[in-house]
Image (tube, helix red, strand yellow):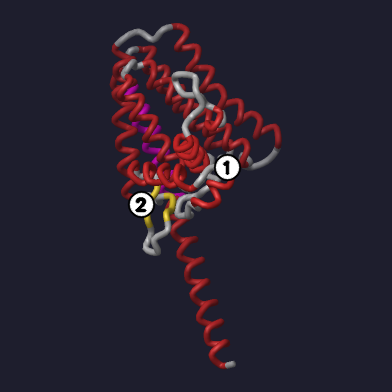
Amino acid sequence: MPKLLKTKSRKGNPKSARERAYLCIQQKIADREISAGNAISEVALAAELGLSRTPVHEAIRQLLGEGLLEEDSNGSIVVVRLSRQDFVELYELREVLESHAVSKIAKGRLDGKDLERLHTLAGEIKALRNQLTRSGKKTLNDAQMRQFEMADISFHTFLMSIAENAAALKFFSKVRYLIRVFAARHAGHDAEALARVHKEHLDMIHAMVEGDVHKAVQAVSQHVQASQQERLREYSYWEREALLRSQIQDIFHDEHGEAVSRN
């Protein structure tokens, strides 16, 4: 992903100080440098960017208004953590948007170049599976999982673009961004999971080529629902781990406090 700090405004001028700070924070969230639940430091960001605190403060207020940041009970500004219900609703929206897209494409005629591009993008998942099989390892490593995420997002984003609905594509991109950034990070996929995703992508393509609307919608619905269940399992695991860490910290603090009082 290109560094957003190097982008130019539409008039060719450098971004304003507030825009630079805004894009920097957004980039750090997207790259998971600042994880969900972690605090944003105005002082640290201002020092990093060589700016005063004012534009950084303004950027943070903008992100608060957009819902990417929130104020916690201690008054700190933190990256939002979405609830289980939030993810359920995001996936419902994703399913509706993609179902509409494949339905529209299936009713029309899939251009040869678009079809070739879809197969190429689907093939990137197959290539990762082959790479994993040859390595003899059980799951993808972190770098390979980032490749998987980008390949999968590219496939679905291109699919949405073929449907030629700019509003739907923009909304879809926002939904996928929220899912990717705020969900627990994917555990490394194994060869079976990669084969499943590749097959589901091909099922969508074949249904659209055949002009079978029902089959295309069914294929994308099954794919999105499988992804949803995977994410919710990861969310449940994160919840258990967070609770366990909290309980251990409470026990440690209680024991430490008792030890201090005895002295």
Q: Which residue is mark 1?
A: 50
Q: In x, y percent, where is residue 163?
A: 34, 17
Q: Quadrant of the N terminus?
A: top right
Q: Secondary structure at mark 1?
A: loop
Q: Residues within 10 Å of mark 1 (few under 14, many from 20)?
A: few
Q: CA distance from mark 2 to mark 1?
A: 35 Å
Residue at the location (30% across, 35% down)? 93
86 in relation to 72, above or below: above
Q: Which residue is mark 2?
A: 83
Location of residue 137 (image quadrant) = top right
Q: Is residue 230 left or right of residue 89?
A: right
Region in magenta = 215-234
- Most extreme residue toward the bottom is 262
Q: Nearer the viewer, residue 56 or 250?
A: 56
Residue at the location (58% across, 40% down)? 190
- The residue type indicated by label 2 comes to Ser
Q: In x, y percent, where is residue 243?
A: 45, 65
- Most extreme residue toward the right is 135
Q: Main secondary structure of the magenta part?
A: helix
Ranked by sequence position, the earlier of labels 2 and 1 is 1
Asked if the magenta segment contains residue 221, the reply would be yes
